[in-house]
Image: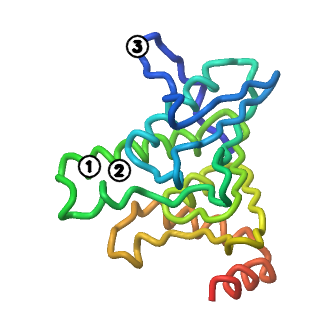
Amino acid sequence: MKHNPTRSSSASEPTPDPDLVTLTHHPTFTVVRIHAGPANVLTRNLWGALAAALRVVEADETQLGIAFLSGLRKPIFSAGNDIQELYAPNTSASRYRDFWLTSNTFLIDLYTSRLVTVAAIKGASPAGGCALSLCCDIRIMTSNTCMKSYIGLNEVALGIHVPKFWGELMRRTASRASGAAIDRVLLDAT
């Protein structure tokens, strides 16, 4: 259930970076194409562009929904979070904190948005791509013959801690699935 009222947008708020995302407005919904090639790696800047896109759509009272999809030609929704911004030897404490603050603020806003939210996932969607999709009301994932489609929180396997609410999102989403669906996901993952 959605809880947040429409957030107001001011002229001082940033607009979505057109080098990272493109918005296509329809009468009652907007499609956000993520095209941060070559693999839609979720940098702090891309998280910020997604947040700006959500604010733009929420500010338009005629809009009832928003759909996120990859604008890449290859079968990939997102390669996940930018490891360079998370890996200790390559970042600073301030940059690390800013990355998580930017990404999680967007994810909370998405999860609590008044809009109907959709993630249209083609191909891979690990880490941040998985978290983005878990915050959407509807997730549609294609099967792909060129590349195995997968989704999950792979940061843990890399020794990077993820926010506890990401794990809770995964648990809540999986608990709604049927036993057969969970078995299929687990069998496909092996």
Q: Which residue is labeled 2 in the image?
A: 100
- Number of callouts in the render? 3
Around disc 1, counting alpha carbons within 10 Å, would you say few (fewer than 14), some (14 to 19), or many (20 or more)? few
Q: Which residue is labeled 3 in the image?
A: 12
Inspect the image, locate mark 3, and give the three-letter code of the amino acid beneath it: Ser
Secondary element under disc 2, as helix, strand or loop, is: helix
Residue 114 is situated, as x and y percent measured from the top left of the image, at 66, 33
Inspect the image, locate mark 2, and give the three-letter code of the amino acid beneath it: Trp
Inspect the image, locate mark 1, and give the three-letter code of the amino acid beneath it: Arg
Q: Are marks 2 and 1 in contact (CB under 8 Å)?
A: yes
Q: Is residue 51 left or right of residue 94?
A: right
Q: CA distance from mark 3 to mark 2?
A: 23 Å
Q: Nearer the viewer, residue 163 or 94?
A: 94
Residue 101 is situated, as x and y percent measured from the top left of the image, at 35, 45
- Please say which color scheme the image uses: rainbow
Q: Residue at x 71, y 35 (%)?
A: 31
Q: Residue at x 57, y 41 (%)?
A: 110
Residue 47 is situated, as x and y percent measured from the top left of the image, at 45, 42
Q: Residue at x 72, y 46 (%)?
A: 118
- Disc number placed over residue 97 in the picture, else none: 1
Q: Residue at x 33, y 47 (%)?
A: 99
Q: Is residue 86 left or right of residue 11?
A: left
Q: Quadrant of the C terminus?
A: bottom right
Q: Is residue 19 left or right of residue 140?
A: left
Among numbered discs 3 and 2, the one appearing first in the sequence: 3
Q: Quadrant of the N terminus?
A: top right
**152 w.r.t. 28: above or below:** below
